[in-house]
Image (cartoon, rainbow, N blue to C red):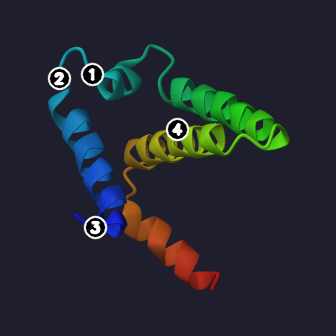
Amino acid sequence: MTDADVLDEVFAVIEDRKENLPEDSYTTSLFTHEKGENAVLEKLGEEMTELVLAAKDDDREEIAYESADIVYHMLVLLSMKDMDLEDLRAELAERR
């Protein structure tokens, strides 16, 4: 797997969790949370705050960690909205 493929692989796992809802899966808990998508939105807000603080502290390791958390939760949100990476890629391509 190349680094470029990792987003596709992570998104495929998210889609699988959405469809199969395995127990003991954090991703499943996001899809089945009583707050619905608000649980993911709250996590995105929390992770953004943590990223800002890591950047303020110039903590490169923490910046990478929090950025990964943001991307993961963003991918869950895309899946919840029945969107996929092609929607994201198309939007980014429009901005080039």
Q: Which callout, 4 or 1, points at the residue further toward the start of the chain? A: 1
Q: Mark 3 packing: few (<14 Cα in 10 Å), some, or many (20+)?
A: few
Q: Amino acid at mark 2?
A: Pro
Mark 3–mark 4 CB contact (< 8 Å): no
Q: Nearer the viewer, mark 3 or mark 4?
A: 3
Q: Which callout, 1 or 3, points at the residue further toward the start of the chain? A: 3
Mark 4 sits on what residue? 69
Q: Quadrant of residue 45?
A: top right
Q: Nearer the viewer, mark 4 or mark 1?
A: 4
Q: Amino acid at mark 3?
A: Thr
Mark 1 sits on what residue? 25
Q: Give the number of marks.
A: 4
Mark 2 sits on what residue? 22
Q: Quadrant of residue 44?
A: top right
Q: Amino acid at mark 4?
A: Asp
Q: CA distance from mark 2 to mark 1?
A: 6 Å
Mark 3 sits on what residue? 2
Secondary structure category for the residue under label 3: loop
Q: Quadrant of residue 84?
A: bottom left
Q: Mark 4 packing: few (<14 Cα in 10 Å), some, or many (20+)?
A: some
Q: Which residue is the extreme one toward the right?
A: 56
